[in-house]
Every structure is written in structure tokens, then in C-alpha cells.
Amino acid sequence: MTMDTTIEKANTHQRISAEEALELYQQSDLLTLGTLANQRRFHLHPEKRVTFVVDRNINYTNVCVSQCRFCAFYATPEDKTKGYVLTHDELGEKIRETIALGGTQILLQGGMHPDLDLDFYVEMLSFIKDNYDIHIHGFSPPEIDFIANKSDLSVRDTIATLKTAGLASIPGGGAEILSDDIRSQASPHKCGAGTWLEVMRQAHLQGMRSSATMMFGHLEDDAHIVEHLERIRSLQDETRGFTAFIPWTFQPGNTNINVRKKTSAEYLKVLALSRIFLDNIDNVQASWVTQGDKIAQVALFFGANDMGSTMIEENVVASAGVDFMLPESEIRRLIETAGLTPHQRDCYYNLV
């Protein structure tokens, strides 16, 4: 099959194979990919609307035994000066501030803390649910797998328990690259690709929605990026549980992986390929947190229809030395000056 045939398939919104995606990514120029992605974006969302959510990333703990090479945020269990666990009072203060700023959800994530059991998570969720009217988007698949193993429960039963306590949806964190060849090098103590996907499958089977992510630009090659996209698309064919896909670039500062930082053009190519290939996921999100405001604005014409979160608080990427912050007013301005219309949404992409 020729490149022209693959481009024609993408141009007419037909599904392309993994082999075609890899060829398209490696042989097409940036503007060709961007044009195809922009056409797919407006095919799926013909209105000139760009959504965003007002929320806060709350890291309830930074203590983690995983010690991923790409992470600059974690503290070891032995580090009593850097390590922390938020109290309910501290958690409540952050949530009240979020609500006061118009927030509709919190993103609740932490590390794999060896001393926190399932009761801790249930109590934390119950405290939030009983005291605040806010959507809890929390616990990445590696966290849920860790809690399940520590509690000697199945993933399915662990998710059911967390859901009963107040968990409403699951973020796509901890995916990095869904290839065990890469995960064994970058995060050998974290769950494998199959487990990540199984956690998401079990959540979707219980009626929970989730996002999917990809952190690229560290130890993978082009084929691993396509493998990741193919595994996400395959699970979405099965469950239809993913609301959005968010690719972002690895930030090497203060980490144990020494690589050249990906350029903005490389980010835009992967973003565009994601929009073209993931024909069964409605929304693709721009990563202003890693790319900054200008490239995030350009991303709106490379397949992205969502600007993600206002991120009233963000700690993990900031630990790697990247500290872009955008208030809601600035996100709205970026969308409007691109000739598009901003709309606040909730976790399920309903307009607020």
C-alpha cells in the first residue's frame, strides 16, 4: 500500500492500521499530518468549540516505592523530610479553594505508599464525598493495582470498593508507553502494560469512565508509540470507556533519564497521529502543561479539541523544572484568539 493510499484513507476518515500509522508518522511532514488531524478533529466536532475543565491536581502523598526513572516528584519511604501524606484538613482546604474558583472536579493522585492500606483510601474518599460536592477523578491504574495487591483483593473488587466510597472516574496516568520492553527500563517496579489495560477494562465494565494518556520522548522508538496507540484503540473498541486521549512529552529535568528533550514539532506530530489513529476516542487534549501556551494554541489545529485543565495546582511536571501556569481567563483568551469558542466542561465532556 502506498503512502498516497494511506493519506487518502485518513483524508476520508477511514481506519488506518498500525503499519500505515507508523509509515505515515515516519514519512509524512509536519503539515501533512497536521492537516489530516485537523480535518479529523472537525469531522468529529464540526462546531468551533474548544473545551476545558476547571480542576486541581491534588497529590495526597509523594511517598512512592516505584522510583520510576522519569519521575522527579517522589520521595522514598525513608525520606522523612521530603515525604508527606495530606491530612483531611489539608485536603479540605485545597478542595474548598477549588470550588471557590469554579472548579467541578479534583484529580487525586499519589505515590505507591507502602504504609497506606485500602482503609486509608476509603476514608479519604468518604471524607470528600460526605463534605464536598465535587467530582473525584482519581487513582491511576498503577495505584489501583498497588492497592489491590497490598489488600489481597482483585482489581475488580478494589475498584468496586473505591467506587462505593466516592471515586467517580479514573485518570490515565501511569501509562507512559504501553510496551513492557520500555516499562522494564523506565519503571521496572510499576505494573506492566497488560495490567494497566486490565485496570481500565475492569473500571469500564463497572460503568466508570477514564482518560488515556501517553508520555513519550524518553526510551521508546516510533514503533512503541504506535504500539501504545494500538493498544488504547483496541481496548476502546471493546469497552468504549475512554473519554479522551492526552499525549505529552517527557520532561528530563531532575530525572534519571538523560535524553534530548522533544521539540514542539515532534510533539505536534505525535498529537496529530493520535487524532488520526484513535478514530474511536472522541476527544484529544492539548498539553499546555508541558508545551506552554503558544504551542498549546497551535495544537488546536493539529487535532486537539480540548485544552485540558486549568490546573489550579500541579506538582509532578513542575518537579521536572517545567512550570507553565494558565488561569481560566488566559485559557479562554488563547482559544478565542485562535478563532474558536471556549466552553467549560465536566469530566464527561458535558458543557457546564
Image (cartoon, helix red, strand yellow):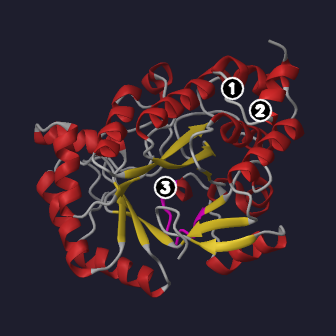
Q: Which of marks 3 and 2 is in front?
A: 2
User: For the point 39% across and 49% down, which residue is it?
Assistant: 74
Q: Position of residue 101 (x, y in %)?
A: 50, 84
What percent of the width, then of the height, locates residue 330?
A: 70, 76
The total of numbered circles placed on residues is: 3
CA distance for labels 3 and 2: 35 Å
Marks 1/3: CA–CA distance: 34 Å
Depth check: 285 or 123 in front? 285
Residue shown at 67%/81% (left/top)? Answer: 329
Instruction: Specify which label sits upstream in the sequence, 3 or 2.
Output: 2
Q: Give the range drawn in magenta.
A: 308-316
- What secondary structure is the stretch in magenta mostly built from? loop
Under mark 1, the amino acid is Ile
Tag 1 residue? 16
Task: Report which quarter residue 277 is drawn in.
Answer: top right
| Residue type for callout 3 | Val
* Residue drawn at x 42%, y 83% as measured from the top left: 99
- Crowd tier of the residue under label 3, counting other residues whose Cα lies within 10 Å: few below 14, some 14–19, many 20 or above: some
Among numbered discs 2 and 1, the one appearing first in the sequence: 2
The three-letter code of the residue at mark 2 reads Ala
Mark 2–mark 1 distance (CA, rounded to whole Å): 7 Å
Task: Reply yes or no: does residue 340 show up in magenta.
Answer: no
Q: Residues within 10 Å of mark 2 (few under 14, many from 20)?
A: many
Res 165 quadrant in image: bottom left
Instruction: Locate residue 162, reporting x and y percent.
Output: 21, 55
Q: Tell me the residue that label 2 is attached to.
A: 10
